[in-house]
Amino acid sequence: MKFITVDSYEKLSRMTANMICAEVISKPNAVLGLATGSSPLGTYAKMIEYNKNGDVDFSEVTSVNLDEYVGLDGSNDQSYRYFMDTNLFSQINIDPKKTFVPNGCAEDLAKEGENYDNFIKELGGIDIQLLGIGLDGHIGFNEPDDVFIKETHEVALDPSTIEANARFFEKEEDVPRTAITMGMMSIMQAKKVVLIANGKNKKEIVEKAVYGPITPQVPASILQLHPDVTVIYSEN
């Protein structure tokens, strides 16, 4: 595991975008594992800039996102499909038909999870997976638990996650209580992983994930077992 500390969110974002875009330049049909939330926004802004400048071409890329709220479809402005369409996909030359987000409105969420895992396998796996980290150590929506769950699955969101995400909704009661999330298998089978975190409030959990014991109580700690992980952290 490579741990990099930078002194600004701008540098974190540029470094992360450079890693993702380098993967696409070296493999034009790369499979990108993408994340939502506030942490990746700067990275996506840089990717958009590089694409508009002609430095990187996303036309052959396939993307698979980590997660989605249960009950929100892509027309809901708090859904992760809407987030990705708005903050990245609509602003680069990726084929919309090659952008995939778990379906939080599927009638059978267990079957949706199974299909999502099989689809990632059919793609040949993820070439580079972008991750954020929650204050409780979650990656995707893999919350602290007694075990690491391998498959894409429905999960009850931790109260700390609901509280953290309430800022995106009119009120906390509007935050969905469950989500569908990629499990640890597809994440750990990605060829490369880059985890980003910014803010002093993330310092303690990042240190636990990187240097602490490997435990499902800190889901991100499993990344210590991955052969190619880069963690980029900025206090600012």
Image: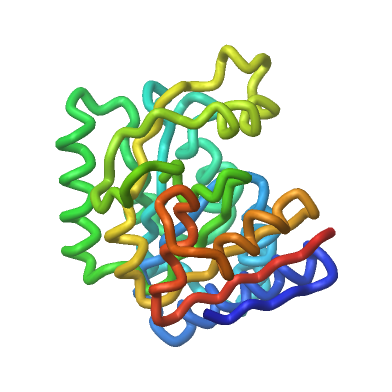
Q: Residue at (81%, 61%) from the top-left corner?
A: 235
Q: Quadrant of residue 13?
A: bottom right
Is residue 63 positioned above or below 164 on the image? below
Which of these two is toward me, 146 or 19? 146
Is residue 93 among what the camera can see? Answer: no
Is residue 43 positioned above or below 70 on the image? below
Q: Quadrant of residue 236?
A: bottom right
Q: Position of residue 173 (x, y in %)?
A: 58, 12
Which of these two is toward me, 47 or 110? 110
Outermost residue on the bottom side: it is 26
Is residue 102 positioned above or below 21 on the image? above
Is residue 132 among what the camera can see? Answer: yes
Q: Left of 213 or right of it: where is 234?
A: right
Is residue 202 positioned above or below 11 on the image? above
Q: Position of residue 84 (x, y in %)?
A: 52, 45
Q: How many marks are shown on the rendered structure? A: 0
Q: Position of residue 58 (x, y in %)?
A: 47, 68
Q: Quadrant of residue 136?
A: top right
Q: Residue at (70%, 27%) from the top-left corner?
A: 167
Q: Residue at (49%, 76%) from the top-left corner?
A: 229
Q: How is the image coloured?
A: rainbow
Outermost residue on the front side: it is 213
Q: Position of residue 220 (x, y in %)?
A: 49, 58
Q: Residue at (84%, 71%) from the top-left corner?
A: 7
